[in-house]
Amino acid sequence: MAVQTLPSTVLAEGFTYGEGPRWRDGKLWFSDFYAHRVATVDLDGRDRTIVEVPQRPSGLGWTPKGELLVVSPKVFDCIAYLLEHRSRAVGRDELIAAVWGRADVSDTLLGQTVLKARRAIGDTGDEQRLIKTLPRKGFRFVGQVREAREVAGPNPGDPPESALA
């Protein structure tokens, strides 16, 4: 089978570290990590800052209602770890080691990160419908999870591959 090379087009330049590109509503959406923003670029190369993020934006997606969802790397790592280990409670020290890779993280920082994780997925500290705090045990993701088994290919209606420079 021969490999076909398709031409690419540079839409825009000058970003500090573009990551997590998503095609939506006729625009390329991405996190400009070190510029602390989420931006879009349209097919004419016009870029627009959608939101400035105090921490470095990492995870980028949309809620089922179509609202933009942006989280910092630590919040993303917290959600991912709790999801990966949802069959059991994850202790404080284990979660800190998994997310920060060190032991000198305060309970305040851990609590703030878990609260931001809850808010990012539509939960609260009061309701705890998705992430529960289990006294003397840790945290557990208890929401329903639907796993995608296949990686989606490009949509036939999408424009050709493009590159950020």
Image (cartoon, helix red, strand yellow):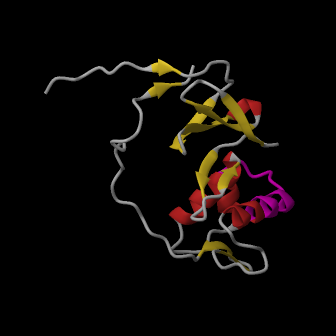
Quadrant in which the N terminus is drawn: top left
Examine the rendered structure and indicate whether residue 159 appears above or below residue 74. above
Which one is nearer the viewer's eye here, 19 or 64?
64
Query: Where residue 151 sits in the image (x, y, percent)?
Result: 36, 50
Work out which residue is located at the far front of the displayed protein and give it: 44
Q: Is residue 77 left or right of residue 151?
A: right
Toward the viewer: 75 or 100? Answer: 75
Is 100 covered by the magenta stretch?
yes
Residue 89 located left or right of residue 48: left
In the displayed structure, would residue 78 be above or below residue 12?
below
Q: Which residue is drawn at 78% across and 74% down?
A: 125
Which quadrant is the C terminus positioned in?
top right
Q: Position of residue 74 (x, y in %)?
A: 69, 50
- Lateral position of residue 53 relative to residue 137, left or right: right
Q: Residue at x 55, y 22 (%)?
A: 11
Q: Position of residue 143 (x, y in %)?
A: 57, 76
In the rendered image, the vertical position of residue 58 relative to residue 96, given as above or below: above
Q: Nearer the viewer, residue 129 or 27?
A: 27
- Report the span colored magenta: 99-114
Residue for point 82% across, 57% down: 109
Q: Where does the image place residue 160, in percent across and percent down from the top left?
A: 39, 30
